Amino acid sequence: MMRQYELVERVQKYKPDANEALLNKAYVYAMQKHGQQKRASGDPYISHPLEVAAILTDMHLDESTIAVALLHDTIEDTTATRAEIDEVFGEDIGRLVEGLTKLKRLDLVTKKAKQAENLRKLLLAISDDVRVLLVKLADRLHNMRTLEHMNPEKRARISEETMDIYAPLAGRMGMQDMRDELEDLSFRYLNPEAYETVTNRLAELSARNEGLITKIEDELRDLLVANGLVDAVVKGRQKKPYSVFRKMQSKSLSFEQLSDVYGFRIIVGDIPACYRALGIVHTRWRVVPGRFKDYISTPKQNDYRSIHTTIVGPSRQRIELQIRTRRMHEIAEYGIAAHALYKDGEGSEGGELLSKESNAYSWLRHTIEALSEGDNPEEFLEHTKLELFQDQVFCFTPKGKLIALPRGATPIDFAYAVHTNIGDTTVGAKINGRIMPLVTRLNNGDEVEIIRSGVQVPPAAWEEIVVTGKARAAIRRATRMAIRKQYAGLGYRILERTFERAGKVFSRESLKPALHRLGQKDVEDAIAAVGRGELSSLDVMRAVYPDYKDERVTVKPAADEGWFNVRSVSGMMFRVPGRSAEVREDASAGHHAPSPLPIRGLSSSMEVRFAPSGAVPGDRIVGIMGEDGNGITIYPIQAPALQRFDDQPERWIDVRWDLDDENKSRFMARIMMSALNEPGTLATVAQTIAGLDINIRNLDMGRLATDFSDISLEVEVWDLRQLNQLLTQLKDLECISSVKRVYD
């Protein structure tokens, strides 16, 4: 435990004219008041305020702040009162001690509304005098250093509070070293397995590269001295466990993939020397592209100034370099505590002087003044985290509501965060009053106004733009529903026409009892399946009316000698090769082929299939025997694919249609059309198809140009006459530019 004279000596090292009497009086008062009190570790309680004071002496703070550190627990844990402290030490110190006492009673890890209100009180107390913040952070740091003596539940609660509130607040105030230590200690208790794993790996790396940091320090120093920077100081370090773990998590890297575990600081006399050092280093070693940042010309909001660069340096190690002046280094280490104006001022006057120099403290006062007027504590909590947590982006609606989003979020994420319906109908956005693209990345503090349209459906491509899970899931759902709605509209019209021709009336209610026979879970799914061509409208008709019979009549052609029927294939006649000596004229190839050779193994169970583009009754067709003789493929005579068999006449089989009135089959044909890209086009096409009693088997749409789309349809028709009638009627539609039948 530190002794009284040691504390005084530490202060006098950086402030020889320090008020020694005040320090001695505060030490004796705290010792007397805490008396025989013990900490959870068994140490005398006075050891805690002494260690807090020692942490503040490392920041070179004035004796008044050190005195407050010694006294900060007296009102809370002893018989001391505010009036007594005012009398002995003055109102200024009494006010600070009472402020810290109130903060100690706050529980920042509790229900959200209460947490927000307590955080409001914390920041209000801090904004009144920054010394409250400095003492509170030092108090939390020492408590974290001795946290192993607490029970597991309390350790977890305090660590969570530290990670969520105090570590980010220290970072926001520019006290980076304190933030690093607070995060490391919290990490140790919040995720002990990960902490142990990363710590062990770092220890192994350190043992394997023993002496490497010293070697690189020496090489850097010698290089700078050789180029005239004789007063340059080089300090190397290995990154801390939590910093390594956070990078592994954010970049999805394994430990072995980390290439910049070592960091080095070059400290020089002035700003021109910073840029000279940068030039010297970049001239000597290769720079890693995209890893250079100049925070001297553009300081961070917490006053941090430094040049950052990454090089493939000595020993071919990839190392991070920070180049700064001694003054910049003090601010980087101690943040607002490093400002000379604060040390020279006293009480509120010192605070006012500090606010003129420190951007971090100015931010704190401005934030509290702006937000303490709010009525909603939870909104206050979100407003506060706006500035504390740098891995998030906080934006505002035009009415002032705050929306928290991950970094990289776009106005689309913002819209879905407000409400799913707003996201679904978004067509544009204004950011800070200017119309901006929807792919714009949002920044902290942006005001975003969403422009909406009632007929908008979110494009599926948005899924690749957004970063939030909520937006991504909503876009997927909306896309599925839009497609289903489109197909359901098409299916409904097809079913209406089919039922109408059969003298029946179609309704959604009539479909419900037949859903189990159709294998569909609800009416809309069944109707959409008809629109997609997955379900035939006649199958729906038969499911709803089991006694329904199709009355279509066809004429059976006469069979000539030499033709026979394969019983497994209805509606076709095949010519037996060799039965007739007639020479077959191939209309496709335009030449005479010799008489077909006998077919070996042709039987009534022969497999017969259609070409992918199909064939319909009325087409002139030809069969092509499979190479191994195990099947026949039927092609229309116009099919370009037949050219592949020009030199294999023995595989050609003469086939003709043989339909009778008992055959109720439809046949597939493929058509392609170019359609105007406007609302109602697909519905018009669907009505035309349904009006001819034609079923849609499959439908694909592709963008041909801005104003036109390609539509590929597989339809099921009775015969060629019906198909030609469809092509004629489609050509007459104003929304159709061209239409043709497609062959393989």
Image (cartoon, grey):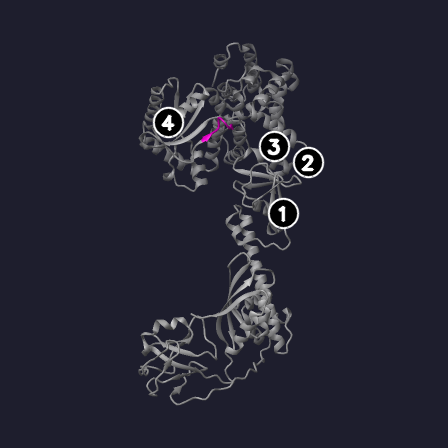
The range drawn in magenta is: 293-299
Distance from label 3 to label 2 (Cα)?
A: 14 Å
Residue drawn 49% across the image and 85% down it: 660
Between discs 1 and 4, the one toward the N terminus:
4
Q: Main secondary structure of the magenta part?
A: loop
Q: Amino acid at mark 1?
A: Ile
Q: Secondary structure at mark 1?
A: strand
Q: Nearer the viewer, mark 3 or mark 2?
A: 2
Frontmost of labels 4 and 3 is 4
**Is residue 293 depicted above or below 702 in this figure?**
above
User: On residue 415, which mark appears?
Assistant: none
Task: Give the image quarter of residue 311.
Answer: top left
Callout 3: SS: helix
N-term mark: 3 or 2: 3
**Could you tell me if residue 30 is visible in this image?**
no
Q: What's under tag 2, amino acid-wise?
A: Asp
**Amino acid beneath label 3:** Leu
Disc 4: which residue? 281
Residue 585 location (% of width, % of height): 37, 81
Contact flag, marks 4 and 2 (Cβ < 8 Å): no
In the drawing, does residue 735 fall left or right of residue 54?
right
Given residues 716 and 529, the one toward you in this image is: 716
The residue tagged 3 is: 119
The mark that comes first in sequence, 4 or 2, is: 4
Tell which circle, 1 or 3, labels the residue nearer the N-terminal end: 3
Q: Position of residue 478 (x, y in %)?
A: 57, 55
Per the image, label 2 sits on a secondary structure element best described as: loop
In which quadrant of the rendered image does the C terminus lie? Answer: bottom left
Image location of residue 408, percent across then percent down: 52, 41
- In this figure, which residue is indicated by the disc labeled 1? 451
For disc 2, the marked residue is 375
